[in-house]
Amino acid sequence: MTSATGELDAAGIAEQPLRSAYLRCRALHARHGRTYYTATRVLPPGRRPGVHALYGFARWVDDIVDEPAPGTTTADQRARLDAIGADLDTALSGGRPDEPLLRALAHTVRRYGLPADYFTAFMDSMRMDLDTTAYRDLAHLRAYMYGSAAVIGLQVLPVLGTRVPREEAAPHAAALGEAFQLTNFLRDVAEDLRRGRVYLPADVLDAHGVDRPLLEHCASTRRSDRRVRDALAALVEVNQGFYREAEPGVAMLSPVARPCVATALRLYREILDEIADADFDVWRVRHRVSDARKLAVAAPALARALWARTVPGPRAGD
């Protein structure tokens, strides 16, 4: 596997402060996005820093919302997001931001021509987390997920490259972002409840006789309930629909990128299988794909990616 510095060399990133910023993004990705990071290892080295920058920025901001220091108020978090938003505007308009991590992001944005409104939408969704604790239906949840997940898929798409016009692949990339996030919401119901949030559509919960007190009871006792299991099963089917919507987009990617996205899709989708195999019990264990399974899926994908790199033709960013 190519080293971190080898990835930066392959991407032509030579300035030392910028390299340091990218390395910070990479470290955030490796520590927090383990399934996605595993899939990223299948990409050509020169394309990995861009993905790390996008993930690192999103994770950094998300942690400000979800992992505040003791004593931090909502007003403090909002002020911090506003400060980041202003620094982000500086970065995306060609200025020098105060935060080094944003320098890596701005470099990636310029390199791949990413629209600034993707990042505006992301910041809007992060602000929603400060005062929105429930979602009345799937449409309401998807309005949030557009900024928090769909735009991540859209941001990554130019880094990966496509063999069709980008606008043709874009809906599938957005669907994959939503698929990944809804999988996280289903896996992390108990964790989100501890933060005072429910990311499951209220109309689906209501249809199965589930309310927040019942979810909190399941979380506190670490025991499931038939009504909750039925609601989660229904939402797993919704989630599978997002994956089905995303799947055709894999073939639209550049050949060297397909194994990476196919690996991520397969591994994340297997989390749903883990949840179903546990009879939709998400209270006693945080479902995940084992490291051995990740390796079993990633190794053949790496072989396919290496084979794709031998095919003659332009491979920008390889």
Image (tube, helix red, strand yellow):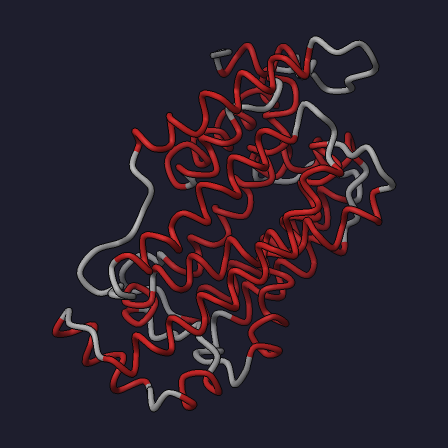
Residue 117 placement, left or right of 193? right
Name which residue lies at 44% across and 65% down: 236
Quarter-of-image position of residue 91: top right
Query: Going by the image, does 299 lie left or right of 95?
Result: left
What residue sits 78% from the left and 34% below the top?
Answer: 162
| Position of 17 relative to 156 (above/below) | above
Residue farthest along the right direction in this orientation: 165
Q: Is residue 131 left or right of residue 11?
A: left
Q: Against 115, is 250 above or below?
A: above
Q: Nearer the viewer, residue 256 or 147?
A: 256
Q: x, y (%) of residue 112?
A: 78, 33
Q: Camera-side residue: 73 or 247? A: 247
Q: Quadrant of residue 296?
A: top left
Q: Nearer the viewer, residue 143 or 245?
A: 245
What is the number of callouts on the image? 0
| x and y, in percent, of residue 315 in the image | 77, 17
User: Does 216 appear above or below 294?
Assistant: below
Percent position of residue 247, x then y: 64, 48
Up/down of 32 relative to 298, above or below:
below
Q: What residue is drawn where x is 76% and y is 50%?
A: 170
Q: Quadrant of the C terminus?
A: top right
Which sits in the foreground, 149 or 14?
149
> Where is residue 289 drawn, in percent x and y?
33, 41
